[in-house]
Image (cartoon, rainbow, N blue to C red):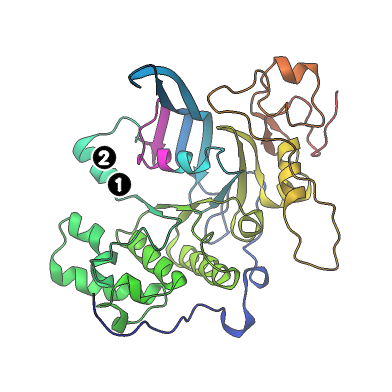
Amino acid sequence: MSGPARPPEGDAPSHGEDVAQRQVGTPISGPARTPEGDAPGEPLLEARGLQRHFPVLGGPLGITRVGAVRAVDGVDLTVMRGETLGLVGESGCGKSTLGRLLIRLLDPTAGSIHLEGRDLSSAAGAELRALRRRFQMIFQDPFGSLNPRMTVDELVTEPLRLAGAPRAQRRARALELLAMVGLSAEHARRYAHQFSGGQRQRIGIARALALEPALIVCDEPVSALDVSIQAQVVNLLRDIQRDHGLTYLFVSHDLRVVRHIADRVAVMYLGRIVELADKRSLYAAPAHPYTRALLAAAPVLDPGRERRKSPPRGEIPSAMHPPPGCAFHPRCPMAAARCREERPLLRAVGARMVACHFADADGQLSGQ
């Protein structure tokens, strides 16, 4: 394809601005804040007993079911209106699968999903198409998620075209969307390959905003970008949330990024939520041994702070054959006999939820 030369990068934060300099609003304890910060949010999306098991085929012909990968294995989760809920964990823990389940890009094996009180898990046909207008997704790969044959204005208004909007309305909306993400009208007729990675992710964000959704699932939206560009995209997402009252589920393996955008954080391990707390409490005093290990393994950018890195020991067990009892016990330095025999339920411990037999309300481990 031919076209004008690639525009300038334009992705470095202006005036030295980065994520750390623009802290998210006051962290919450208990119910999530609204964008205005003046009242607790109400539940926007609720999942109960959510499972997604992928069949594993074997046998001589490769068509016999020999097991299942339990990618999501019994998740209860509530996303509050107006909040950013961070979802973190190691690669392979099921967090991206959970994000796709919550917006029906995948169908659940079991469990229920309700969006604004309506049953999303069983919706089909016209009902599902109507519900899809209420949520969108920003994908990890800004290079592979955009159709190279479409111009930018066509890309960002594709949801409107599928919804039956007339061409004139789509053209006007395209300019609005591009302005919202910091791109100009002159970019509208260019193609995705003419843009930098950060600009392509801005195009993906604009596309997600086209139908004015209530919920956006951000699946590792900055992991493919340079650190300076990550800061700009995160700040853009926060500004858009503030201006338009959006709710985010922010999926990431990078606890540094999550710390600067999330209100609450859910920690996922081997298909299950093991801890859910407001950001301040979780980072200051993690209550689950796995959360502690993740935070201990995270890099420290401040040279004045020294910390011995202590990543989770060993490898994540197979999601096809998870360990009995607590799934984390083979890697946990505090595991006891009870952990090997009895699976801990996700329970309220003070203002947080923890799936550990020995967690207490102060973020301590006791009772062993």
**For the residue labelled by badge 1, is the local secondary structure a helix, a strand or a loop?**
helix
Residue on which disc 2 sits: 128
Residue 298: numbered disc: none
Q: Position of residue 209 (x, y in %)?
A: 35, 62
Residue on which disc 1 sits: 132
For the point 46% across and 56% down, the residue is 140
User: From mark 1 to mark 2, how far is it between C-alphas?
Assistant: 6 Å
Q: Which amino acid does label 1 sit on?
A: Arg
For the point 23% across and 66% down, the residue is 149
Taking 333 as reference, is 14 above or below it?
Answer: below
Is 191 displayed left or right of 22 in the figure?
Answer: left
* Res 288 visible: no
Label 1 Cα crowd, 10 Å radius (few <14 / some 14-19 / many 20+)? some
* Res 205 visible: yes
**For the residue labelled by badge 2, is the local secondary structure a helix, a strand or a loop?**
helix
Is 123 displayed left or right of 301 in the figure?
Answer: left
Instruction: Tell me the quarter of the image containing the N terminus.
Output: bottom left
The range drawn in magenta is 100-118
Taking 85 as reference, is 235 above or below it?
Answer: below
Residue 356 quadrant: top right
In the image, is residue 107 part of the stretch drawn in magenta?
A: yes
Label 2 Cα crowd, 10 Å radius (few <14 / some 14-19 / many 20+)? some
Q: Position of residue 117 (x, y in %)?
A: 38, 37
Residue 163 quadrant: bottom left
Q: What residue type is labelled 2?
A: Leu
Is 185 displayed left or right of 57 in the figure?
Answer: left
Q: Position of residue 11 (x, y in %)?
A: 50, 77
In the image, is residue 335 part of the stretch drawn in magenta?
A: no
